[in-house]
Image: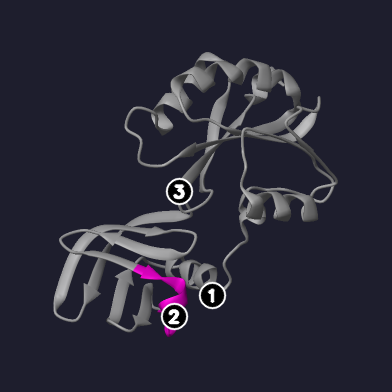
Amino acid sequence: MGREARCVARVGRRSSEGKALLETKELIFRGDFQLAIPYEQMKKVAASDGTLEVTWPEGTARFELGTPEAALWADRIRNPKSLIDKLGVKATHIVSVAGLDDAGFLKQLRARAANVSLGRLTKDSDLVFVGLDKMEDLKKLPTLERTIARNGAIWAVWPKGKPAFKEDHIRAAALRSGLTDVKVAAFSPTHSALKLVIPVARR
């Protein structure tokens, strides 16, 4: 996920209070009516007096986000971060990947990071990306903690829309393993990612 905010949205004569979400490729609003506006369909994006204005083929929507939030959202829509940037991958990083087979992600990762290990976990990795699909997979977390550098992070990637295995399960297992979650990101249209780190007191 990117950003979210409670706000009033207006489209034509319709007006509703609700939640706006700035996702990787679209702007979503959930209230008395719902909107999902892909960036690629936006013809105009502007921010003025705390209101974000978005024009797309179906009309113009105005989101009363406040200042400076409206301007920030407009900038992020016009200049979206790449997945690798959102995940915090740097050119100097040692990265390990396990249980993930996303060709687009791996291509970006190899182009950015200094060292990428697939399948085999490299000790003192700055980042570890691990695919988790079921409750049994959560047993991997203590081992993964021993793999990352003390100031490193684990990105747990899981499929969306599975009530039997969701973000809350990963967060609870992380806490039991002595890790804490600090960020959620949209990994792909089908997967989300949760960033886990070692608490500062234990580093």
Q: CA distance from mark 3 to mark 1?
A: 23 Å
Label 1 near label 3: C-beta < 8 Å?
Answer: no
Please report the bounds of the magenta region as a residue range: 37-47
Q: Amino acid at mark 3?
A: Thr
> Dot 1 lies on which element?
helix
Residue 125: give x, y in percent of width and height. Answer: 78, 32
Label 2 near label 1: C-beta < 8 Å?
Answer: yes
Number of other residues with Cα within 10 Å of mark 3, as a class: few under 14, some 14 to 19, many 20 or more: few
Q: Decide: is 120 above or below 51.
A: above
Disc with the residue nearer the chain's start (3 vs 1): 1
Q: Amino acid at mark 2?
A: Val
* Relative depth, front residue between 77 and 99: 99
Residue bearing mark 1: 78
Whether 95 is among the magenta residues is: no
Q: CA distance from mark 2 to mark 3?
A: 27 Å
Given this view, does label 3 or label 1 mark the residue nearer the observer? 3
Task: Name the residue at 47% across, 51% down.
Answer: 1
Residue 178 shows in the view: no
Residue bearing mark 3: 190
> Dot 3 lies on which element?
loop
Q: Decide: is 17 above or below 49.
A: above
Q: Amino acid at mark 1?
A: Arg
Task: Name the residue at 69% across, 49% down.
Answer: 106
Q: CA distance from mark 1 to mark 2?
A: 8 Å
Given this view, does label 2 or label 3 mark the residue nearer the observer? 3
Disc with the residue nearer the chain's start (2 vs 3): 2
Residue bearing mark 2: 45
Whether residue 89 sits left or right of residue 130 in the image: it is right
